[in-house]
Image (cartoon, rainbow, N blue to C red):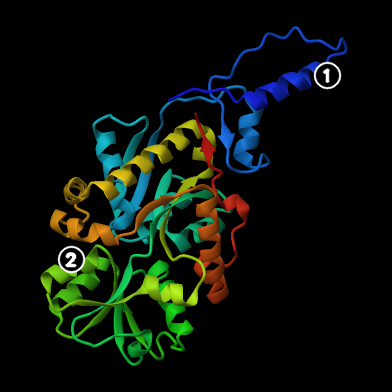
Amino acid sequence: MKKAKLAALWAALVLLTACGSSAGTSDTQETAPSETIETTESSDSSETTEAARSETIPAEPIEYTISSLKGPTTMGMVKLMSDSEKGETFNKYNVTIHGTADEIVAGVVSGNTDIANVPANLAAVLYNKTEGNVKTAAVNTLGVLYVVSSGEEITSVADLKGKTIYSTGKGTTPEYVLNYILRANGLEPQTDVTIEYKSEASECAAVMAESENAIAVLPQPYVTAAQLQNENIIIALSLTDEWDKVSETPLITGVTIAQKSVIEENPVAFADFLGEYQASVDFVNENTDEAAELIGNYDIVKAPVAKKALPYCNITLLRGDDMKSAVTGYWNILFDADPKSVGGNLPDDDAFYSEMIYE
């Protein structure tokens, strides 16, 4: 880790010490802090306040327990996982890949999971459920949902009226995004359109691969996986495009959350995690062939599927103010449509990690 002085903060502390001396001078010996920080957020945030109270911040590596979902939310993390196994990262990352978001919830609520990649709406639910003990630190995936068809001619949302759609993500992003788009186009879910939910995206992909006439909502890379098994499957609608027609805030699929206590225990290590995660995302987006091999090695999807799907997976790592603005806008839309989608209450500003920059 690099070390740097927070010159402005240190100078202010020295000045305050001088002003408080009855003699008007101070003989206190200056000792520079071992780690100092700058923050992109206001100084009244809890992380910044705690850092300002301490002259030193430990820069020791942490062994993090991470839960992630099988799909794009983990695809961007594969280089981080590989490097960690080789001992080439500052921290150690023990990543467990899950098929459904429900499998992640218990570990987050109990505190046994340090960091998790979850559907964007679930981050708000967990913030409310844990009474503010988790923070959203980044957006890791933007829109990846598509309406696919193996026979039905679907050219608009209106064409879905009277149809049956297979989907995954009951109680998470796919359900709420699909419902919002349907209602914005005058269709009531489960009245005008029948939606049959499967537990995992791979199940929906299997239905599509075996069917001559079916409709499903699938995320990448499962769209590509289904197409490779059934050449008649076509992408009928991009739900990102349909969302953009009825909303001014971007469609967000996945976010990265962390335990508040884990962040506060060692803010330098957590900031380093985000930096190493950013490097992993950049690698995956810039090195398709190598990234696809890693994705295959971790059994997320087979390497040939990953190679074709990666350009359409919208893997990112949106942080700081951009993250906060995008997620807040998205949560507001979900809350207005259905308060239970975000846990009944809109999270406040404390739900977000205040990005800290170490130089």
x%, y% of residue 53?
A: 66, 28
Which residue: 40% across, 76% down? 242
What amino acid type should be assigned to the residue bearing mark 2? Answer: Ala
Q: Name the residue under label 1.
A: 20
x%, y% of residue 294?
A: 20, 46
Reply above or below: 264 against 215: above
Q: Mark 2 points at which residue?
A: 225
Secondary structure beneath label 2 = helix
In-front residue for pair 307/68: 307
Which residue occupies the extreme right position in the image? 22
Label 1 environment density (alpha carbons within 10 Å; few <14, some 14–19, many ≥20): few
**N-term mark: 1 or 2:** 1
Secondary structure beneath label 1 = loop
Quadrant location of the N terminus? top left
Q: Is residue 194 toward the left or the right of residue 291 in the image?
A: right
> Is there any visible trace of residue 119 in the rendered image?
yes
